[in-house]
Structure formats: structure tokens, C-alpha cells
Image (tube, rainbow, N blue to C red):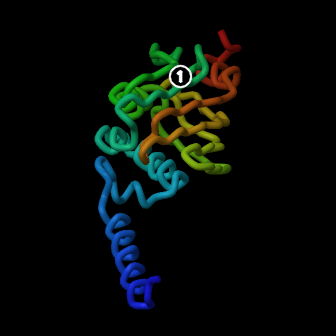
Amino acid sequence: MLGPKSVEHGSAVIRRTLEAASSTPRPGAHPDRDAMSSHDIVQAAWKAFATHDADRISAVFTEDAEWLAPPGNATATALDCPSHLVGREVITRFLAEDFSRLFASDVDVTFHGFHADGDRVVVEETMTATLANGNHYANDYCLVFELRDGLIHRVREYMDTARGHHTVFGGAEE
């Protein structure tokens, strides 16, 4: 039978072990990102996107990240780029360089909701901008972000493709 001193000693050992385990970073851990909620990670990513700074954008994606938009969407068509972007480098280049070739100025995103459930965050938004051709752009989006290890691993983007084509090209979707 254990006496009270043995129980106290055992409790102290367990407490110290748990405290040490929680303060020891795991391999590949990112202390700032690990402390953030999935909601906060995606909000921070939007701030990075807005800078068009390749290093800041790259830092929010996994190496094998994917960004999937509807095939033939107006942005992909106008920029002659794929609607399914694969890899951190490709996504970063699109957001840092290609995006502003079409959305030339006055880019504004109005967020209507961030809905997080575990490593999945759904963002509802409206984006407006002045296009390179001078047209005013306005479209509603729903984006589903999937996180892995505190980084964006996959984005599925949904938008009104007919409205996008009409705004970008002045007519119906091709």
C-alpha cells in the first residue's frame, strides 16, 4: 500500500513530465502557428496574400499545396493559367505576381464569414477590384481551406463563374 508521501511524489513527477512534454516543441513545430486556431491561421494567410510578398505568401502553404478553382473560370482564362494550381511555388507566384496582372487596382475583400471546424475553414467573401482593362469587378466567393500542420494544404474555391466571365470579358461564359 502506498503512503501519502508516495502519492504526492508520484503526482509531482507526473506533473513535471506533463509540463516538460507540453513545453518541448515537436519536430517541425512552429510555435507561433501551433498556438493559433485554424481560423486565425487562415485570417493571417489573407493578410499575407494582400501584401503580394512572395516570402510571406509562401510561408503559409505546405510544399505540396493545391488551389482548385472551377475549370475555365474567368481569372484562369484571362491569365492563361491553370485553374488547378499545384505546389507552394506555383501558388505563391500566382498570388504574388499573376493576380495583379488582372486585378490591377482597388482590390477589396469584404468577408461575410469565417467558419472553422478542426483543420477546415470556410470563408465567405465578396471581392471587388478594377481590372487591367478598366472594368469594375465584383464577385462572391466561398473558399474551403484545409490545413495540415498549421499550414494551408488545399484550397477549394467556388465563385459565380458566369458573373466573372461577364465582368472580365463583357459577355457570357465561354
Question: Is any atom of residue 97 visible in this view?
Answer: no
- At 50% from the left and 51% from the top, the residue drawn is 43
Pick the quarter of the image with the C terminus.
Answer: top right
Q: Residues within 10 Å of mark 1 (few under 14, many from 20)?
A: many
Position of residue 15 relative to residue 42, above or below, is below
Position of residue 52 relative to residue 111, above or below, is above
Position of 66 with respect to 118 (left or right) is left
- At 47% from the left and 38% from the top, the residue drawn is 105
Secondary element at image label 1: helix
In x, y percent, where is residue 2? 44, 84
In x, y percent, where is residue 122? 62, 43
Position of 88 with respect to 36 (left or right) is left
Q: Which of 169 and 161 is in front in this view?
A: 161
Q: Mark 1 points at which residue?
A: 75
Q: Which of 108 and 144 is in front in this view?
A: 144
In x, y percent, where is residue 170? 65, 18
In x, y percent, where is residue 59? 33, 43
Quadrant in the picture for residue 32: bottom left
Q: Label 1 amino acid?
A: Thr
